[in-house]
Image (spheres, rainbow, N blue to C red):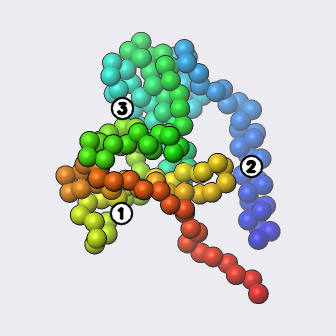
Amino acid sequence: MKIVKTVSSLAAAALLMAGCAFTPVQPGMSRDQVLASYGTPTRIVPVGSGTRLQYSRQPAGQSVVMVDLDAAGKVVAVREVMTPQEFARVEPGKWTREDVEREFGPPARVDRVASWPGDIMNYRWRENNIQDMFFWVYLDAGNRVQRTGQGMEIPSRLEFKF
């Protein structure tokens, strides 16, 4: 237990030190300024007449930030998408795998189970900075969203001390 606390403390300190040089991305900034601050995006996708830079911390992390640029390469929006409000935008029966990945980035994991005919996309997120959660997107055999769900992420290994 002490080792875990020490590692967590060191990781937190490293993040704070790295944060000193970190410049928040804001509307109006150029693409070059975004890249200087956030680095290389996980994925770049076309959105309307502009471009979306996806910064995903999946599969280990619980954050996905989207930076939308206009046709001139200026930031028009920056948002965290691993939130219940963003998940509520998914429209079963209308959205496809491509829509989900454009809006949320690549999933942390894709599962298959015998009781479902298609893939199940798994995204990790954190509710209120307290509870580790999953957001599931159930696709049919044609890669169209049929339903979504949310649930708590349970650690794969529990330690019991007697």
Amino acid type, residue under disc 1 in the picture: Asp
Q: Which residue ends up furthest to the top in the rendered image?
A: 72
**Total count of labels:** 3
Q: Residue at x 73, y 57 (%)?
A: 8
Would residue 87 appear left or right of 8 to someone viewing this image?
Answer: left
Residue depth check, mark 2 versus mark 1: number of the one nearer the observer: 1
Amino acid type, residue under disc 3 in the picture: Val
Q: Position of residue 107 (x, y in %)?
A: 41, 51
Query: First in sequence: mark 1 or mark 3?
Result: 3
Q: Secondary structure at mark 1?
A: strand
**Disc ID at residue 12:** 2
Residue hosting label 3: 45
Whether residue 130 appears in this view of the structure is yes
Q: Residue at x 51, y 54 (%)?
A: 124
Query: First in sequence: mark 2 or mark 3?
Result: 2
96 or 92: nearer the viewer: 92
Q: Residue at x 31, y 69 (%)?
A: 113
